[in-house]
Image: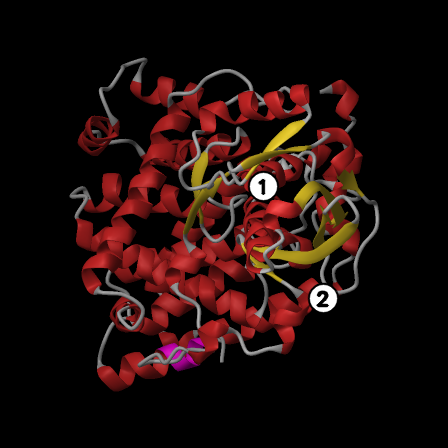
Amino acid sequence: MENISVFDMLKIGVGPSSSHTLGPWRAAERFIKELKELNIFDKCSNIKIDLYGSLSLTGMGHATDIAVTLGLTGADPETVDTNKIEENIELIKSFKRLHLNSEYYIDFNFEKNIVFNKSFLDFHSNALTFTATINDSEDYKSTFYSIGGGFIIKEEDSDNKDKSDEHTLPFPIEKASDLIEYTIEKDKQISEIVLENEKSWREESDINKELDRIWSTMLDSLYTGVHSKGYLPGGLNVRRRAYDIHTKLLGDSKYENKEQWLEVLKSINPSFRDIFKWISCFALSVNEVNAALGRIVTAPTNGSSGVIPAVLLYYICFVNNKDTQKDIRQFLLVAGEIGCLFKKGATISAAMGGCQAEIGVSSAMAAAALTELLGGSVDQVTNAAEIAMEHHLGLTCDPIGGLVQIPCIERNSMGAIKAINAAELALETKASHSRVNLDEVINTMWETAKDMNIKYKETSEGGLAIAVNIANC
């Protein structure tokens, strides 16, 4: 049984894509580790990176080339100064030298050392191969696969038992039915079961500290997004809308920090129409930050990172109005566990399952978490997740120009609103009246993913990606 922590689902990173940016970045870090373990790191004179499949087809728009380069320099996506990314890449391009793991320089031609192969490897559609030249003569190669949500594996990893599988949990969970059974047996909420599992990895104080750090990062991206105006990079001339919506709703006021801004939000009493606008504003703000290579939290991916913060901030500002740490932690624990169920039973990779695997999963995560906070039963919580996913089934991934901008940013708004609607529907539904359960919809999503044409899986070879004339943008 695969054991996944909620902190595997909710990871701090840099935009615009968890599978195309964060995953390749982590692959580069792991490659450096391999070189050191083999005692050939200091003998490396050149490194070439071959990108395959979706990474090659939409990698440039998703900053895959930037991510692998920064990973080779030893920069960490959780701490790197995002304001200096462009400057650092330009220096590498200009001097054609790379500071390998920040230890010594090697020759590196950005345009030639990173190759976008328009072909696929068999194991997974997101593949990249690093080739290091050792002693100016021998080559050491290593191939990685970015499987969504910032997760990376090697083909040989699938033949061996994952280290996390050896970890013993008090409540091992493979399916939603397992989770429900434990809550009934122990008379606990889902968040309480999840917390007990997390405590087998780390102390409760550390769990709370990390949950608080995740929410703080989400709030940072929300605050940054609504206060950033202008156009997003990439050439599509997509205007940032969160700033405009925020200004219309709240005026052009300035706040000293995100905490002061949050207090102002909690003090307003918006109309029904304005609540919808606020939810959209929140979701757009995070994904505009993501599209601009800003720092966000995968939830469960970068491309869907706006849904959970938007729904949680909606609850804090317009439902609960207290912003208690307990509620925030509870929300994130439930959301994270629902994401784990989808990763185990289906996929969270758009390259494998289309956008249903990103926005659909994030909407299900948010719906379930909101339902528990609103007092829903365990059956209602899982029913909310099922409803949210049910109405994302078959959603394609067709980014225009290979960028996480159109239709990706707006889809976060739709996913957030669907999550709230799903929660309210679940709360008004008796468990005995529900005809579809969460395990069934997870399995259906996976079967749908397998049936979906490859051109609708993050390749920009179908849908809006080919229907829209980029030249007119």
Give me the residue at 33% from left, 63% from top: 427
> Closer to us: mark 2 or mark 1?
1
Q: Nearer the viewer, residue 30 or 1?
A: 30
Which label number is shown at residue 72?
A: 1
Residue 14's spot in the image, x, y percent? 49, 38
Is residue 34 found left or right of 309 in the rendered image? right
Q: Is residue 44 above or below residue 342?
A: above
Residue 7's spot in the image, x, y percent? 38, 58
Element under label 2?
helix
Specify start and end residues of the magenta stretch as a single range: 175-179
Give me the residue at 70% from left, 47% from top: 458
Element under label 1?
helix
Label 2 Cα neighbours within 10 Å, binned few <14 / some 14-19 / many ≥20: some
Residue 413's spot in the image, x, y percent? 48, 40
Viewer can see residue 235? no
Q: Is residue 435 above or below residue 23?
A: below
Q: Nearer the viewer, residue 126 or 136?
A: 136
